[in-house]
Amino acid sequence: MKHWKIILAVLVIVILGDLALTFLLINKAPAPTNNNPGNPFATSTQNTVESPAVFTTNFYKWYLANRKESLAFPASDNLNSLLGPWLTPRFIANWKKIIADTDADPAILSQDDPSNWGPGLGSSIISQSNTASTVKISIGSGLTVYTYIVRLIKIDGNWRIDSVAGS
């Protein structure tokens, strides 16, 4: 009977420790670095050790802070230089098609201005392998919280967002 209590206590400690570590990683994530000073949009942490949840959180922090009509609905063909550090080539190629089909911003799947959603931003890993991951991210606060399922794949050792879907 004592062994059962010890095993349960160890499991609780491991789970709580994992949750605390995830919370710290998400809330203390390093700010994205600018890999191309001539292009203020070409930013990414480019960290192969970084978890997919941290990478996704960093992308949305960067995207929401820098989101402009020219980024969400670009008139030119410079999407690769703007979003290449964050997205897969496939997602970049589909960006304009998503806009044409839905008339919505492909990163937030909305026509709304996300600056009105509130400051909340949180993510958690749903599943992960060495080459792919699925992350749940929530944006907003109070009554206005939008949740997305973000699929990532690892390209050349770096996480890249491959798709975004509503939850």
Image (spheres, rainbow, N blue to C red):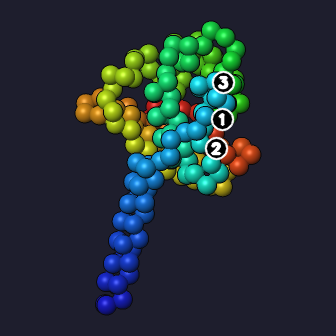
| Residue 87 visible, this angle | no
Secondary structure beneath dot 1 equals loop
Task: Report the residue marked by disc 3.
Answer: 38
Q: Amino acid at mark 3?
A: Gly
Q: Residues within 10 Å of mark 3 (few under 14, many from 20)?
A: few
View extreme (bottom): residue: 2
Q: Amino acid at mark 2?
A: Gln
At 49% across and 21% down in the image, what residue appears?
67
Task: Return the mark for residue 46.
Answer: 2
The amino acid sitting under disc 1 is Asn
Q: Residue at x 34, y 36 (%)?
A: 120
Q: CA distance from mark 3 to mark 2?
A: 18 Å
Quarter of the figure that contains the C terminus = top left
Q: How far is the residue under mark 3 from the one under mark 1?
A: 9 Å
| Upstream in sequence: badge 3 or badge 2 | 3
Tell me whether the residue at label 3 lies in contact with that at label 1, contact meaning CB atoms closer than 8 angstroms: no
Going from the N terminus, do you reach mark 2 or mark 1 first?
1
Q: Residue 29, image x and y in percent?
A: 47, 47
Q: Secondary structure at mark 3?
A: loop
Residue visible at 54% across and 23% down in the picture: 106
Q: Secondary structure at mark 2?
A: loop
Q: Which residue is mark 1?
A: 35
Question: Of tags 2 and 1, which is closer to the observer?
Answer: 1
Rendered residue at 38%/81% (across/down): 7
Q: Residues within 10 Å of mark 2 (few under 14, many from 20)?
A: some
Give the tally of numbered discs.
3
Q: Position of residue 158 (x, y in %)?
A: 67, 46
